[in-house]
Image (cartoon, rainbow, N blue to C red):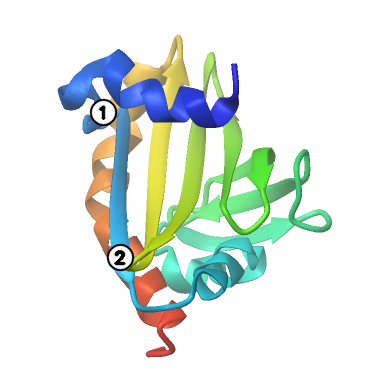
Amino acid sequence: MDKMILWALLPFVFGTVAAQSNRHFFDSRTTTAAPHAVWKLWTDVPNWHVWDTGLQSATIDGPFQMGQTGTLVSDKGRKVRFTVIEYEENRAYAFAMKLPLGKMTIRRELKTGSGTEFRHEVLFSGFSGGLFGRLLGRDYREMLPKVTQEVARLAEGKG
């Protein structure tokens, strides 16, 4: 089944409450910025820390594309490798980080209409997904609206 369809079905599979739990959560925002401005911020990995307060730094091992790997250093100094697992140019991508007995997936998606709508989603999955959702999810969930607000501000040229 197409990955885009699977992501779209997640709220229905897990239900409304679970879709906004510490294990699976998202924030959507509409901006006046052009879609390419948001996309440029999202794919400029070395500068993710500018708008993502949960990161000290990020690097990528080559061009931003399907299968590419990189490294994130969290605000607490935890270093973790990631792999781009979904990629649709100027529309959406997802990357995943292995956790003991599970993984954490970040998905970002753009939609256009009256303005540019973008969505940033976080999912802890696997056997340990619930545990990591409890350990990390609350902090990430609380920080996410600030992250999307900063992406909008920078994309609109207010940075």
Residue 150, position in %: x, y? 35, 72
Badge 2 marks a residue whose secondary structure is strand
Q: Does 102 sit left or right of 150 as displayed?
A: right
| Whole-percent x, y for residue 22 in the image | 25, 32
User: What residue do we see at 43% from left, 15% from top?
Assistant: 128
Foreground: 108 or 21?
108
Which quarter of the figure is the C terminus placed in?
Answer: bottom left
Disc number placed over residue 19 in the picture, else none: 1
Q: Residue furthest front?
A: 113
Q: Is residue 40 left or right of residue 26?
A: right
- Report whether residue 82 is seen: no
Where is 48 relative to 23, above or below?
below
Residue at the image point whose x is 45% and y is 29% from the top: 7
N-term mark: 1 or 2: 1
Residue in the foreground of this view, choosing between 108 and 8 = 8
Residue that extends furthest to the bottom in the rendered view of this protein: 158
On the question of residue 54 being in view, the answer is yes
State the residue position of label 2. Answer: 30
Crowdedness near tag 2: few (<14), some (14–19) or many (≥20) residues, C-alpha within 10 Å: some
